Amino acid sequence: MDPSVRDVLLECTRASDEERVTFPEVVKKLIGAGVERYHADLLRSEKTYYLPSGESEVVASHIGGIVPSQEFSAQGVDAAVRAIQAGKIQYKAFCERVAAAGCVGYFVSMAGRRAVYYGRTGDSHVEWFPGAK
């Protein structure tokens, strides 16, 4: 993987963990670096970024110690998304809230303009990027 792309991935992960950037800012930077999609694993505290070429990079996240609930609540995930979009919470609280709603990870597709949050049993909630539908 190109070192400049790797630098963007590391910076996006760190900046999110440190609550220095918003989700739209991260998406913009990742698109600029050619990233097609990424997966955030809340249990493993890591993100995997994927390029259209098939290359991928796993980056450790420092948002850890979160234990997701057993039961998935799409309404709980949606409420956390609305709270962070409104600026009422930041990334760490967002991760805690989606985990409390049973989310164990999520996929973000820049190409598909959506995020898919999922629970232990495969239950999911799709959140479209604003204006994507």
Image (cartoon, rainbow, N blue to C red):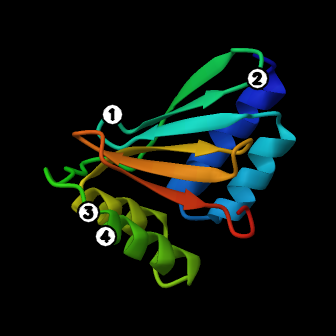
The disc labelled 4 sits on which kind of residue?
Gly
Q: Which residue is mark 1?
A: 44
Q: Which residue is mark 3?
A: 73
For the N terminus, give its image quadrant.
top right
Residue drawn at x 81%, y 19% as measured from the top left: 2
The Cα–Cα distance between marks 2 and 4, rounded to whole angstroms, is: 32 Å
Label 1's element? Answer: loop
Indicate which disc, 1 or 2, sits on the residue closer to the N terminus. 1
The Cα–Cα distance between marks 1 and 3, rounded to whole angstroms, is: 21 Å
Spot occupied by residue 55 in the image (x, y as percentages of width and height): 69, 15
Indicate which disc, 1 or 3, sits on the residue closer to the N terminus. 1
The Cα–Cα distance between marks 3 and 4, rounded to whole angstroms, is: 5 Å
The Cα–Cα distance between marks 1 and 2, rounded to whole angstroms, is: 24 Å
Query: Mark 1 or 3, which is nearer the eye?
Result: 3
The disc labelled 1 sits on which kind of residue?
Arg
User: Badge 2, how many Cα within 10 Å: few under 14, some, many 20+?
Assistant: few
The Cα–Cα distance between marks 3 and 2, rounded to whole angstroms, is: 32 Å
Residue drawn at x 60%, y 22% as measured from the top left: 57
Res. 76 mark: 4
User: Badge 1, how many Cα within 10 Å: few under 14, some, many 20+?
Assistant: some
The disc labelled 3 sits on which kind of residue?
Ser
Res. 52 mark: 2
Indicate which disc, 3 or 2, sits on the residue closer to the N terminus. 2
Label 3's element? Answer: loop
Indicate which disc, 4 or 1, sits on the residue closer to the N terminus. 1
